[in-house]
């Protein structure tokens, strides 16, 4: 399988999402996801209409993509293997319930 990676320029993100990045620096914790944390200045700005909701959603999407691409192949393999095991267990459990 060939892996395709999208290179995202840090300066490009800072320009495109400048307000979100500036507000995220004011958050209480540095490892925020800006999705459900109480007191998150980014979420408050979205709720007040200071940040466009579509822009916010694009920012989250790019952050998820960046996190995915930063993970190592081994990490992804481990997650895939764990998911496969869970799926196999689920199928076995479902077959047992049929009988």
Image: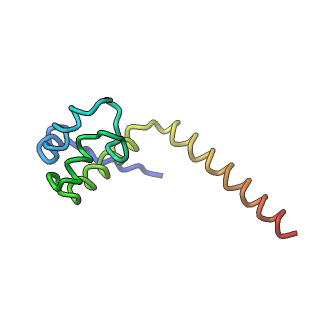
Q: Which of 11 and 58 is in front in this view?
A: 58
Residue at the right extreme, as displayed = 99
On screen, 79 above or below 87? above
Residue positioned most to the left: 15
Q: Residue at x 30, y 49 (%)?
A: 60
| In the image: residue 78, left or right of residue 7 | right
Q: Residue at x 63, y 45 (%)?
A: 82
Image vertical order of residue 88 relative to residue 40, above or below: below
Q: Is residue 63 left or right of residue 95?
A: left
Residue 49 picture quarter = bottom left
Instruction: Please state if 2 lies on the left or on the right of 94 as rendered.
Output: left
Judging from the image, the colouring scheme is rainbow
Residue 55 x %, y %: 20, 55
Q: Name the foreground residue: 78 vs 14.
A: 14
Q: Residue at the spot x=36%, y=41% of the render?
A: 37
Check the image and name the residue furthest to the bottom.
98
Instruction: Name the foreground residue: 54 vs 79.
Output: 54
Residue in the picture at 73% in, 61% down: 91
Q: Position of residue 81 (x, y in %)?
A: 62, 45
Report the side of 57 relative to 84 (left or right).
left
User: How many numbered tags mark residues here?
Assistant: 0
Q: Where is residue 85 in the image (x, y as percent from the top left)?
A: 68, 49
Q: Which of 32 and 72 is in front in this view?
A: 32
Residue 80 location (% of width, % of height): 57, 47
Q: In the picture, which quadrant includes the C terminus?
A: bottom right
């Amino acid at each position: 399988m060939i892996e395709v990676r999208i290179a995202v320029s840090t300066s490009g993100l800072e320009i495109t999402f400048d307000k979100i990045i500036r507000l995220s620096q004011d958050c209480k914790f540095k490892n925020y996801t800006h999705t459900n944390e109480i007191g998150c200045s980014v979420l408050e700005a979205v709720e007040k209409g200071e940040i466009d909701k579509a822009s916010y959603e694009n920012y989250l999407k790019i952050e998820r993509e960046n996190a995915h691409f930063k993970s190592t192949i081994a990490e992804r393999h481990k997650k895939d293997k764990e998911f496969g095991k869970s799926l196999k267990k689920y199928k076995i459990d479902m077959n047992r319930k049929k009988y």
